[in-house]
Amino acid sequence: MDSPITGTRPTVTAVTSVNQTKFLAGGDVLTITGTLFATTSTISIGGTRCYAAGGTSITFTSATSISCVAPAMRGGSYAVVVTNIDTGYSMAENVTVTYQSATPPTVTLVSPTTQLPAGGNPLTITGTAFVGSTVTVEGMNCPTVETITANFITCIAPAMEGGMYAVEVTNADTGFSEAMDVVVTYNSTTPPVVTAVAPIYQTKHLAGGDILTISGTSFVRGTGLYVMIGDSPCSTATYVSATTIICVAPAMMAAGNYSVEVTNPDTRFRIAENVIVQYTSFSGTSPTVSSVSPIIQPKHVLGGDKLTITGTLFAAGATVSVGGTTCPNVTVVSATSITCIAHAKPAGEYAVVVTNLDTGVFTSVKFLYVEYLGTRPVVTAASPLTLAQGGGSNLTITGTLFAAGASVMVGETACPGVVFMNATTTSCSCIAPAKLPGIYAVVVTNLDTGYSMETTVVVRYLSDTPPIVTAVSPITQANNLSGGDNLTITSSAFVNGSSITIGGTACINVTF
């Protein structure tokens, strides 16, 4: 049996020459500061030994200071590790040495500047300081890279959607250059098609300003993407996908219907004659809402009650929304009265909005939904507390205010066959559903949507198969007798809530 390590490991707190002035070649003198260094200590940078100049050991100054000459490395940041001969070592994750290229690559030109969406054609990139480089086009790998000189690279253009994409060159030493002004344009092989626009009716009338969503196909991103409403540009045209563009509706001089035109950066364009945006010159008075009845919904969050909205200037074709959701079955009874059917909503207060077809809009006082009438049920106990993984056994739930027709959930799974015991409101039973091993809360919900989530009343499902430990790592504890290392235990049939002991002592902070 191996003997425990009794030495005290050194610590590393700082290193000089964090950034190597000689770049990837190394050669700078590194002075490492810390505690408990020894004359026989060794130093490694990212796993590579670091020695004193011309020697096979380090330069020992004191128990708190040692030095060596930085080795040559690839570009990157590397942890500094000091190891004493008693194998006590310190990896200072926060103390690193950074190597980088003396000169990052630059990209000045790409040829040709246009590609088809399928890609496959050679790209020639011109620039400086190319060394073992890779090329990406907007993050997509440009395969078959051949470095011709430090100033020229060729690769095969990847497949991309239509649009304009920046070219990036990355050297093996992690120096990279993203040339935002040097781009490749992928031209769509088909012109864009506009199929729809929303909203059709401009809520701000001739002033414009609504956000328009244009739907269609073959849209291409890039600085040459334009949307026109009639003869006026739609500002801030933004490419979302090959099927969606958004922009801000322009102001118009006169009311009317205006066609939508999309032009891609490759100058292919399409006018959608049958897809229009409608502007109205609203000059009347917006409708007003003075009251709504009933304020409290008898059917609670399920909706379904008839709402009567009272106000002024309601017009034929008006719509009603409650909290942003359309209220169906609207009937304009008169200029002062509208009815609709309340829709399902979570409990809370919601504003009522009446909108006339000419886009006059008014937001009312708030309208109150209630979640339930009376007191929600309470779960106080469940029996049995442990269940088989396959379910099927009888589960009895005890509590208060259970109502006929109530349902029971175990976790997020319905517990079927709910039966009320002796026609009381304090006890019910159901057939436990099958669940994976673990701990699950028991929830009772009444038909009026009053529910009780008692997280302290839970049932545990046990695995049908006992756990078998097959491996543990690491076998030797780096912290010696004091413990504290993270252990990874490999097994079958672990379940959430399992405990682990080492020689009869509980292992803390168990994570699955």
Image (cartoon, rainbow, N blue to C red):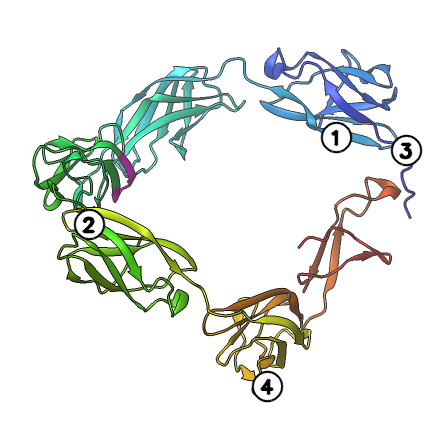
Residue at horizontal 55%, vertical 84%? 419
* Tag in front: 3 or 4: 4
User: How far apart in space, not on screen, are marks 2 and 4 (Cα)?
Assistant: 55 Å
Which amino acid does the dot numbered 3 rest on?
Gly
- Label 4 sits on residue: 421
The residue range painted magenta reads 238-244
Kindly identify the amino acid type of the residue bearing the numbered disc 2.
Pro
Task: Measuring from the top left, give residue 474's x and y in whole percent.
Answer: 77, 46
Secondary structure of residue under mark 1: strand
Q: Name the residue that disc number 1 marks.
A: 91
Report x, y in % for residue 257. 8, 43
Residue 99: quadrant of the picture:
top right
The numbered dot on residue 287 is 2
Residue 201 % position (x, y): 16, 46
The Cα atoms of the two marked residues, 1 and 4, are separated by 64 Å
Q: In the drawing, what numbered circle is on residue 486?
A: none
Q: Is residue 428 above or below residue 223?
A: below
